[in-house]
Image (tube, rainbow, N blue to C red):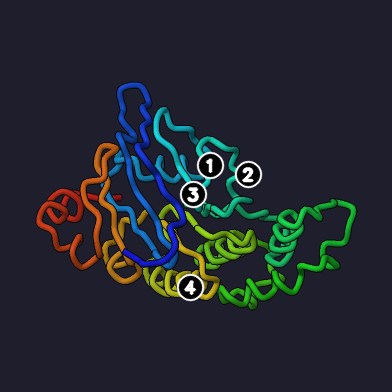
């Protein structure tokens, strides 16, 4: 575990959907500088956890704090402003706008300057948004429509949009899903370098164990709404129970 400042903390989270237990007393912390991977079988509650932390779901028990302040059940927009950003499996882009225009919209909205009648290209945040595109290696596509981008670039632009919100923590659900196999590790390398450069800690759901081994600082194993194990990748991924029940048994 990182010795950095405690950022995000979940305590005793409980949530059921009918007879399905999505969270059954989840306790988990994220410290500054950590990149925590969540692994486990389908239906284990991994994405539910991200949704609780970002306000898309409200738990029936327990709480979530950011920097010691409770954010449980707050609207997603308020949680984002507090410092927890979210990237989805499907990038949330304005497909008929250029990449730079997407960034400028995000920058204007975050600074509360958004005005549909104003020239976006004139906003004071423009240079910062251009620098964010440089950070994720997407300067070359800044003038292309988002709809024209290959999936790897779409993912990176989506991360740039999240980083434009100046979060302390970024939550990601399978950050390279949909990206061609040959491009996955290159995309993840750029993504993680950008997070480190921006000093943003992360939690990411992942099914590729090699990705977890290379990029996670800590791993949490989920099963039926319960955390079975946490620890460093080299320990968790070599645990016989994890190998048998997660790595060998399907973990998408």
Q: Nearer the viewer, mark 3 or mark 1?
A: 3
Residue linked to disc 2: 78
The part of the image, by quadrant, that contains residue 1 is bottom left
Residue linked to disc 1: 71
Question: Seen in the image, is 157 located left or right of residue 16?
Answer: right
Circle nearer the N terminus (4, 1): 1
Q: Relative to 13, is 115 above or below?
A: below
Residue linked to disc 4: 196
Residue linked to disc 3: 68
Q: Relative to 14, is 82 above or below?
A: below
Q: In this figure, what is the number of numbered marks?
A: 4
Q: Secondary structure at mark 1?
A: loop
User: Label 2 neighbourhood size at 10 Å, few (<14), some (14-19), many (20+)?
Assistant: few
Residues under numbered marks 3 and 4 in contact, where contact means CB atoms less than 8 Å apart: no
Q: CA distance from mark 2 to mark 1?
A: 9 Å
Q: CA distance from mark 3 to mark 1?
A: 9 Å
Q: Relative to 172, is 32 above or below?
A: below
Question: Seen in the image, is 160 located left or right of residue 186?
Answer: right
Image location (x, y in percent) of residue 245:
15, 48
Residues under numbered marks 2 and 1 in contact, where contact means CB atoms less than 8 Å apart: yes
Q: Nearer the viewer, residue 117 or 61?
A: 61
């Amino acid at each position: 575990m990182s010795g950095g400042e405690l950022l995000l903390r979940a305590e005793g989270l409980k949530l059921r959907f009918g007879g399905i237990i999505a969270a059954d007393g989840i306790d988990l912390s994220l410290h500054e500088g950590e990149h925590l991977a969540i692994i486990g079988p389908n239906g284990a509650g991994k994405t539910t956890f991200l949704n609780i932390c970002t306000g898309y779901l409200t738990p029936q028990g327990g709480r979530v704090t950011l920097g010691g302040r409770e954010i449980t059940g707050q609207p997603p927009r308020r949680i984002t402003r507090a410092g927890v950003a979210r990237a989805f499996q499907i990038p949330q882009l304005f497909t008929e706008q250029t990449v730079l225009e997407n960034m400028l919209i995000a920058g204007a909205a975050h600074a509360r300057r958004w005005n549909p009648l104003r020239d976006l290209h004139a906003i004071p945040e423009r240079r910062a948004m251009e620098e964010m595109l440089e950070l994720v290696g997407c300067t070359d596509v800044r003038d292309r429509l988002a709809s024209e981008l290959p999936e790897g670039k779409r993912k990176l632009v989506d991360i740039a949009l999240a980083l434009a919100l100046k979060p302390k923590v970024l939550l990601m659900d399978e950050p390279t899903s949909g990206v061609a196999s040959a491009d996955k590790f290159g995309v993840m390398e750029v993504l993680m370098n950008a997070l480190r450069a921006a000093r943003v800690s992360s939690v990411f759901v992942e099914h590729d164990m090699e990705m977890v081994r290379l990029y996670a600082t800590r791993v949490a194993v989920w099963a039926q709404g319960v955390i079975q194990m946490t620890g460093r990748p080299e320990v968790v991924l070599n645990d016989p129970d994890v190998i048998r029940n997660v790595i060998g048994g399907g973990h998408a």
